[in-house]
Amino acid sequence: MRRSLSVPLAGMLLALLAAPALAQPPTTPVPGPRDPNQPPASAPNGPQPLAHAVGDAGTGLGVIRLGPQGVPTSTILPGFGEQLPKQSVTEFGVGLASAQVNTEAFLATERVVTQANPFGFAVAGRSPQSPGTLVQTAIPDNPQPTNGGLPIPETPLAKLKVLNGSVHARWDEKVGPCVSPLATSRTSLAGLEVLSALPAEVPLPVKTSLISVPDTFEASSVVKLVDLPGSKNKAVESTSTMRAVSIELAGGIRIDVASPPTLTATATGDEKTSKITYTAPVLKVSQNGKELGTLDAAHPALDIPLLLDLVVVKLQVAGLTEKKDVFSGNGFSGFQLGATARMLDVQVLPTDKLKLPNLPSALAQISLGEQIVRAAAPQGGVVCGTSQPPQTTVPQQPGAPAAPPRGAPPLAYTNAAYNAIPLFWTGTALLLAGVVLVAALPAGRARTSGRPTS
């Protein structure tokens, strides 16, 4: 199924820039009573799952930022925007795969949400809704994933060939998120060209595009429950992975992906055992057949001049940021953690050497493979089980025989029912009596055929 979602791609991509926010996922707020003295909503009916878990993972294939960190972030709180990172003047992203699990969501359809978004854009941090999203939600459960092609946008910033998506959201009525697979989302791209229509004034030796990905480029986001060592309970694991073969840049630069990145957040409910695991990418960089170096965790940056020293392409990998925190409330208390990373940042005309204030960090920044993960688990781990509904029983006297099971109690009569039944039988008796009386009476005197008298 395809539908427009209220959470656009560009909004998620903005979250990839900043430190991971450890607030709960954006869900429908719980409506409160209009009258403060009004009683709360009724409790759920029937057995309910015992599991409490929150986790989400997001992976973006590519993000183009014009004027990164060029405008301040606007907020409704006075002075708070100065504490937040600056936003890009314009952003455009393609191929987002996101998976979210939130057992505390008020709406049942928001407990597991998986989506594959084809594109999105934002101007100064504001983004409209993005159509064409492939999505699955649970409850109810989805035994099979939803697969399909995603609409390809026509834009001068990027050209795509074939973009496919796959989403799968699961939920068990008895044990909730204790099902495998739980939340999975994937996007795959067969061919990508970025900034293929640059103005002639830009002094770059561009043949076709600034960046091109000729081979398959895949993003995957998965949230699941895994075994907790030494316990029968579970841990929440959110994983973002990328898969790419090679990337080509303007000026004959080629980047071979020797090892793709993987970012995982595992929450056990305890700070000592919860962890962020990151496998940094290993990229081999060459220009016109000449090897320039290797980008990895030990060597995360590389500057390549394209036109003397005036035009420089800056390559950077990793960019890992992580955050951990204990929390309490919203249904349970425990430990949460999150992290963000990027497989490759390509900056054109970086401004760090100009030493001028109020300039964006670069003329343009293209990020390939943006990743974000977050996980939260209650203390002691996630309990997979079902709560039994309370049963009301009548106390039994000692030594008294057990009362036999009773069926459904008879329905109570209303006042109209008590009056209608006697009236019915009374009317029936009177009707029968009338029939008998009519039958017993003698027949009327017959008419005589007399002759006329004189």
Image: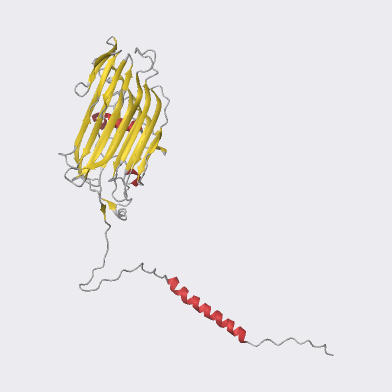
Residue 43 to residue 372: above or below: below
Residue located at (40% from left, 28% from top): 162
Q: Position of residue 144 (x, y in %)?
A: 37, 42
Q: How is the image coloured?
A: secondary structure
- Pick the front one: 310 or 149: 149
In the picture as drawn, the residue positioned furthest to the right comes out as: 454
Left or right for 61, reference 235: right
- Quadrant for the N terminus in the image: top left
Residue 422 to residue 355: above or below: below
Q: Examine the rendering and report whether any part of residue 5 can be seen.
A: no
Q: Position of residue 391 (x, y in %)?
A: 27, 61
Residue located at (30% from left, 35% from top): 221
- Pick the front one: 216 or 130: 216
Q: Position of residue 450 (x, y in %)?
A: 79, 88
In the picture as drawn, the residue positioned furthest to the top comes out as: 308
- Quadrant for the C terminus in the image: bottom right
Q: Position of residue 226 (x, y in %)?
A: 23, 41
In the picture as drawn, the residue positioned furthest to the bottom comes out as: 454
Callout count:
0
- Pick the front one: 170 or 120: 170
- Pick the front one: 318 or 281: 281
**Picture quarter containing residue 340?**
top left
Q: Examine the rendering and report whether any part of residue 186 can be seen.
A: yes
**Picture quarter containing residue 404?**
bottom left
Residue 9 to residue 35: above or below: above
